[in-house]
Image (cartoon, helix red, strand yellow):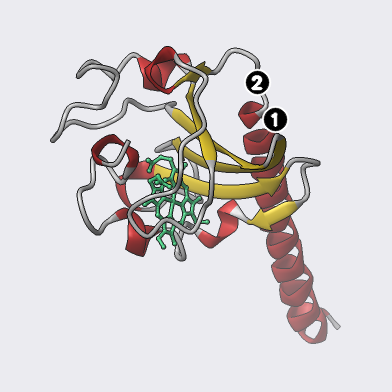
Amino acid sequence: MIKHSAPLILLGFSIFLIHCKKRKEEQLNESLYDESMSSSLVFYKGVDSTYTAAGGSPHGPFKLKFNTTASAALTDNGRLPAGSSFPQGSLIVKELYSGNLLTTYVVMKKDKESRFRSEGDWVWGEYKADGSLIYSAGNKGMSCIPCHTSGSVRDYTRSFDLH
Ligand code: HEC
């Protein structure tokens, strides 16, 4: 009896593990979306500007924001000094606009504790303004990293040499 139920127990356990991973992924996407909307984020160079996408960017017109942990590292005239890295906990949010309408949050967060981190400890996600998912952090930035490692790059970011 016990012998025959072993495969079932294993199957049940695998489903349970997959479920847990999915739930963790959902929670991460929810928290990245919430953090993207935080009113404590600061604008790039302290100015509320809309930038035109450059450098082959797929993102369109945008505003650029940082949490206080990330902004503390912007010591080269508001930029990350070439060759240095963002500290753990840094959050970078690109708000995409269509006219005056905020449509999308594109997010990078530095988190070495996350099981969904990729190279450089970055976690990558993209959400519509209403919170619905465009690009899950569970993908570990696979579609993002090729661009964010080509051209002039500062710790996987592109803006500092373009804007
Ligand atoms: C085709 C190239 C390309 C792809 C793919 C891409 N990006 Fe970007 N990204 C850029 C460029 C170039 C910039 C610099 C700002 C600009 O001009 O748009 C940028 C800027 C950013 C920024 C602001 C910080 C920085 O790097 O300057 C974030 C956050 C970001 N991208 C997240 C993502 C995420 C998340 C993905 C994947 C879902 C992604 N990007 C995919 C090219 C790309």
Rendered location of residue 87, percent (x, y): 32, 25
User: Against 142, is 106 above or below?
Assistant: above
On the question of residue 157 being in view, the answer is no
Q: Is residue 73 visible?
A: yes
Q: Is residue 51 above or below residue 10?
A: above
Which quadrant would residue 44 be assigned to in this image?
Answer: top left
Asked where in the image residue 148 lies, by quadrant, the reply is bottom left
Reading the image, the residue beneath label 1 is 34
Under mark 2, the amino acid is: Ser
Residue annotated with mark 2: 38
Horizontal placement of 40 versus 129: left or right? left
Q: Would you say the beta carbon of the disc 1 residue lies within 8 angstroms of ligand 1? A: no
At 25% from the left and 27% from the top, the residue drawn is: 80
Q: Nearer the viewer, residue 162 or 125?
A: 162
Q: Residue at x 15, y 33 (%)?
A: 82
Lateral position of residue 95 relative to residue 103, left or right: left
| Residue type indicated by callout 1 | Asp
Q: Secondary structure at mark 1?
A: helix
Q: Position of residue 143 (x, y in %)?
A: 46, 65
Of 112 and 13, the residue lying toward us: 112
Horizontal arrangement in the rendering, residue 111 relative to residue 34 (left or right): left
Kindly identify which numbered label has been placed on residue 23.
Answer: none
**Where's the N terminus, which quadrant?**
bottom right
Q: Is residue 76 left or right of residue 147?
A: left
Determine the residue located farthest toward the left in the rendered image. 83
Vertical relation: 31 (above or below) 8:
above
Secondary structure at badge 2 equals loop
Callout 1 touching callout 2 (CB < 8 Å): yes
Q: Spatial distance from mark 1 to mark 2, Cα to Cα? A: 7 Å
